[in-house]
Structure formats: structure tokens, C-alpha cells
Image (cartoon, rainbow, N blue to C red):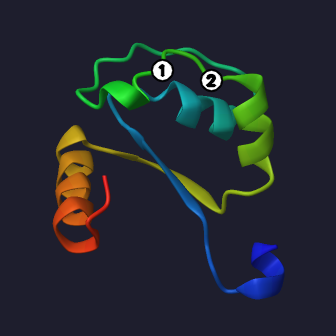
Amino acid sequence: MRDTLAPDCRVVGVQSEAAPAGWRSWRSGTIETAPATTRASGLATTTGYPLPQGILAGRLDDFRLVSDDAIEQAARLLATHAHTL
């Protein structure tokens, strides 16, 4: 659908660098585990999971690790400017 409606649109996944299991799984193409010490509790997974990884594999253009501070800054921006939590 994205390719039809907005072919120039890139989809980039983001995960806390303090909980990189999903990112590692996406990069390697296999399910991987990693410690999760992130303050972003909803993102604190210690393993990749087959179903989400299967969806992400063919749809993400890139996947980046970011700091917890960057996640908190983005959440503040969404709350104050987009009124979204």
C-alpha cells in the first residue's frame, strides 16, 4: 500500500539501544535475545518474536537504535505539538 500511495516514503523502525533484541533480530534475520535495561518500559523486550519480525522483514527500509533520552524527547514533542500520547 505504501509503495502505491507514497513510493518515496521510507519506513524506519526505532528501538531503544538499551533493549536491542528486536533490532538484532531484524538485522540478522533470526530471533535473537539481548538484555533490556531501557527506561522505556513498553519497549523493554529481551527477545525478538517471529510474528513481528516476519512483518518487519519485508516492510522496513531501516531500523535504528536510539537513546532513551531521544525516546523521551520524541514523546514530549508528540505530547506538546501533536497532542498524542
Residue type at numbered disc 1: Thr
Left-right relation of 18 to 65: left
Residue 76, label in figure = none
Q: Quadrant of residue 76?
A: bottom left
Q: Which residue is mark 1?
A: 45
Q: Which residue is mark 2?
A: 48
Residue 59 percent coordinates (x, y): 74, 57
Tell me the SS state at disc 1: loop
Tell me the SS state at disc 2: loop
For mark 2, does the 10 Å Cα neighbourhood hold few (<14), some (14 to 19), or many (20 or more) residues?
many
- The CA span between labels 1 and 2 is 7 Å
Q: Is residue 39 above or below residue 70?
A: above
Left-right relation of 25 to 54: left
Residue 40 percent coordinates (x, y): 29, 31
Q: Quadrant of residue 39?
A: top left
Residue under the image location 76 percent in, 85 percent down: 5
> Badges 1 and 2: C-beta atoms under 8 Å apart?
yes
Q: Is residue 81 above or below residue 31?
A: below
